Image: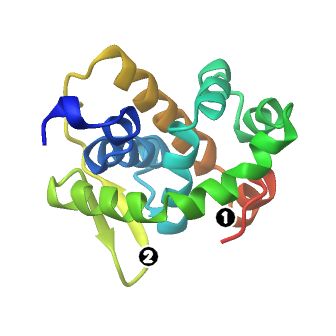
Amino acid sequence: MTVRDLSEVDLVQNPALGAVLLWRYTLGFQGDAYAPVPVPLLFLVLPICLHRRSLESAVRTRKNSGLALFAARLGEVREDLLAIHTRALAFRQLTIDSLSVAVKARLTTVDYQHATARASTLRAPEMPNAVMELSDAADKFGHWCASLSLSQVALLLKVHF
């Protein structure tokens, strides 16, 4: 199989790209405090970053604006906000595969006993502009979630953990 044989979905929804997005989310979440990320939050990254309207809402929302404003913007089309949970379920295996790649590549470590993850502080690799937009959105999303509890994130994004 060659790259030409892959569909656009296969090219975008792959564990290597997912690993980079999870790593950037974790970096954004950690911030200067190097706080560990609760693993359940990682299951929201790909459904948001790999969905066009969610990504556009994240890109339009400033880093300092917070998750509430992002959710409000995304919720302008209520179905987009309510669909995050369904997409999280659909992306479960991709998220697990992506986390596995991130751990193997030493981008992320997982504390299985506490169900948390930490990003390594490696320098970001050079990425094409299209991937940088996704990566920056993941970082921003992590920053937004860092100041909230799991239940607050769940309430704002209408998801269940």
Q: What residue is shown at x 61% (from left), y 48% (from top)?
A: 145
Q: Position of residue 151 (x, y in %)?
A: 74, 66
Any part of residue 114 in sight:
yes
Nearer-the-camera pick, 137 or 120: 137
Q: Position of residue 75 (x, y in %)?
A: 83, 37
Which quadrant is the C terminus positioned in? bottom right
Q: Name the residue carrying label 1.
A: 150
- Which residue is at the far top? 129
Name the amino acid type tagged 2.
Ala
Name the amino acid type tagged 1.
Leu
N-terminal label among 1 and 2: 2
Left of 159 or right of it: where is 75? right
Q: What residue is shown at x 49% (from left), y 47% (from top)?
A: 46
Q: What residue is shown at x 25% (from left), y 22% (from top)?
A: 127
Q: Name the residue carrying label 2.
A: 115
Q: Is residue 13 above or below residue 89?
A: above
Residue 108 position by quadrant? bottom left
Residue 69 position by quadrant? top right
Q: Is residue 151 above or below residue 84?
A: below
